[in-house]
Image: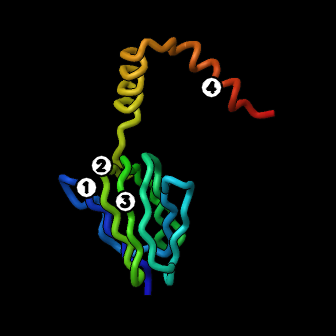
Amino acid sequence: MALHISIIAPDRTVWDSDAEEVILPSSTGQLGILRGHAPLLTALDIGVMRVRTDKDWTPIVLMGGFAEVENDELTILVNGAEEGSSINKEEAQKGIWLIFQNQDVDIEWQHKQNRERWREP
């Protein structure tokens, strides 16, 4: 018996299937859920949820919400969600670029800072 997962956004059901394991972006950090988990209600941050079916992991971007675990059923109510494979990388980068421009952020400086911060030792 597997863990049944339902991800529900205001406009559609994003996921309704069984899985072996889930990692949620909860408001207190990453939260792993397996079959037999104790009942739980938690707030979710904006972040990436990971779902394992067999040996494959599927990333799903969540736009905040709540998750409830009970009787091997995980119900997730979110403001929005998108499966990783359906995200257009170029469109997402354009959107980020526009957000930075509208916030008066020096994008080149920010990019340089990020490269230095995450550079391999």
Helix, strand or loop at mark 1: strand
Residue ID for mark 1: 9
How much space separates mark 1 and mark 4, taking CA atoms? 32 Å
Q: Quadrant of residue 95?
A: top left
Are the two marked residues, 3 and 4, in contact with CB atoms closer than 8 angstroms? no
Which is closer to the viewer, label 1 or label 3? 3
Q: Is residue 119 above or below residue 34?
A: above
Q: Is residue 93 above or below residue 26?
A: above
Horizontal side, residue 55 vs residue 112: left or right? left
Helix, strand or loop at mark 3: strand
Residue ID for mark 2: 80
Image coloring type: rainbow
Could you tell which of marks 3 and 4 lies nearer the N-terminus?
Answer: 3
Helix, strand or loop at mark 2: loop
Could you tell which of marks 2 and 1 lies nearer the N-terminus?
Answer: 1
Residue ID for mark 4: 114
Amino acid identity at mark 2: Gly
At 55% from the left and 13% from the top, the residue drawn is: 108
How much space separates mark 1 and mark 3, taking CA atoms? 11 Å
Q: Nearer the viewer, residue 41 or 101?
A: 41
Q: Residue furthest left?
A: 11
Figure disc tally: 4
Are the two marked residues, 1 and 3, in contact with CB atoms closer than 8 angstroms? no
Are the two marked residues, 2 and 3, in contact with CB atoms closer than 8 angstroms? no
Are the two marked residues, 2 and 1, in contact with CB atoms closer than 8 angstroms? yes
Residue ID for mark 3: 66
Q: Quadrant of residue 92?
A: top left
x and y, in percent, of residue 91 in the image: 34, 30
